[in-house]
């Protein structure tokens, strides 16, 4: 056992003050990743700043985008009438995360800040040209994910909300790990007036990434046939006990074909 402080502020500004008063504090969202990390002694912060009282749960239609508060739980996104109407693929992605317990605790902000290489949300953020709003700036999705478990967030920077652009069409298809439901490979495809974006999770050694070859092919012809002649390279893909890099390369193509049906 080791002791750690716990505080639960009522606003983002109070949360920022609280984290600055700690030498190695951590924001606590739903605790789905952070608490197991503490239990395994992979981190031992001197304090936890619980942001569940900071009023970051709202979901709103902003015209061209849907804005979702960082503390929205996966179940809130899955059940949201606003999300279901504007970006049904995002609601269905949230519905497919983990199990009921994980969906009731896990949050959008925690998932995106953590940038697990097998998490589902980072692919939606990248494919849907999202903007991550923090306490002091707005970061475009293409600049946000910087490597496995790495993001552009500064120390003590808090995600307040994320704006997702509304696509003409979108779909998320994953090949789930049967034990955790994390993506062995997940592909989010989104069609916009100026082209198609394809983001792949679960497969890249550097975490989530856009697949430019498939984006070009689908921007010309939004159908599975457009992918038939493509050879998906396995360079830079994860090889682990669940699947080899070559198997993941094959899954990338298959999941994308299913996504554009
Ligand atoms: C059994 C299991 C199965 C899962 N299956 C899936 C799955 O199928 N697909 C999937 O995508 N995910 C899956 N997850 C991950 C889960 O959905 C959570 O999103 C993820 O674990 C993060 O948890 P959390 O939101 O509770 O954040 P926490 O664990 O509380 O925090 C995670 C990290 O993010 C930081 N953080 C949290 N919120 C913010 C914020 N607003 N601003 C800045 N930093 C912040 C914290 O300081 C911490 O470092 C699974 C998790 C488990 C335990």
Image (cartoon, rainbow, N blue to C red):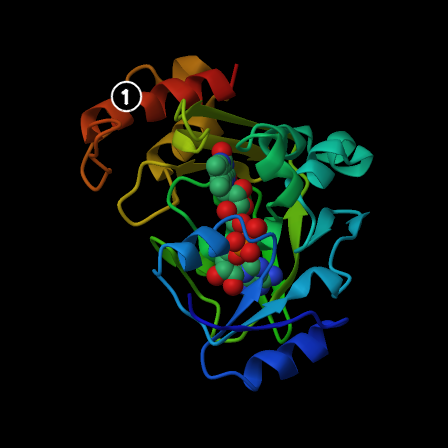
Q: Nearer the viewer, residue 252 or 93?
A: 93
Which SS class for mark 1? Answer: helix
Residue 253 as seen in the image, left or right of residue 233: right
Query: What x and y, as percent, mark residue 213?
Result: 33, 34
Residue occupying image coordinates x 65% and y 45%: 165
Residue 26 as seen in the image, left or right of residue 243: right
Query: What x and y, as percent, mark residue 220?
Result: 46, 26
Query: What x and y, as percent, mark residue 75?
Result: 69, 37
Q: Nearer the viewer, residue 80 or 195?
A: 80
Residue occupying image coordinates x 45% and y 60%: 143
Quarter residue 229 falls in: top left
Residue occupying image coordinates x 63% and y 45%: 105
Query: What x and y, as percent, mark residue 115?
Result: 44, 52
Quarter residue 214 falls in: top left
Q: Looking at the picture, does residue 192 appear above or below residue 20?
A: above
Q: Looking at the picture, does residue 215 appear above or below residue 15?
A: above
Residue 112 as seen in the image, left or right of residue 134: left
Disc 1 packing (10 Å; few <14; some 14–19; many ≥20): some
Q: Badge 1 is on which residue? A: 250
Quarter residue 251 falls in: top left
Q: Nearer the viewer, residue 127 or 151?
A: 151
Q: Quadrant of the N terminus?
A: bottom left
């Amino acid at each position: 056992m080791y002791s750690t402080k716990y505080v639960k502020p009522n606003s983002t500004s109070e949360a920022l003050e609280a984290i600055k008063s700690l030498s190695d504090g951590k924001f606590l969202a739903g605790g789905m990743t952070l608490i197991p990390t503490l239990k395994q002694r992979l981190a031992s912060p001197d304090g936890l700043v619980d942001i569940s009282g900071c009023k970051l749960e709202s979901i709103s239609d902003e015209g061209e985008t849907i804005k979702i508060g960082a503390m929205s739980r996966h179940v809130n996104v899955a059940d949201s009438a606003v999300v279901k109407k504007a970006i049904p693929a995002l609601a269905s992605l949230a519905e497919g995360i983990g199990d009921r317990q994980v969906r009731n605790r896990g949050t959008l902000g925690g998932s995106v800040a953590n940038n697990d290489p097998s998490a589902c949300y980072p692919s939606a953020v990248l494919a849907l040209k999202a903007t991550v709003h923090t306490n002091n700036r707005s970061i475009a999705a293409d600049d946000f994910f910087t490597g496995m478990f790495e993001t552009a967030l500064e120390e003590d920077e808090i995600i307040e909300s994320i704006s997702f652009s509304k696509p003409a069409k979108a779909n998320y298809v994953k090949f789930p790990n049967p034990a955790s439901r994390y993506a062995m490979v997940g592909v989010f495809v989104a069609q916009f007036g100026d082209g198609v974006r394809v983001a792949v999770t679960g497969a890249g050694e550097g975490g989530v990434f856009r697949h430019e070859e498939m984006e070009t092919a689908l921007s010309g012809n939004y159908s599975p046939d457009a992918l038939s002649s493509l050879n998906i390279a396995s360079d830079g893909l994860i090889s682990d006990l669940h699947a080899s890099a070559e198997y993941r390369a094959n899954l990338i193509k298959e999941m994308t074909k299913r996504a554009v049906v």
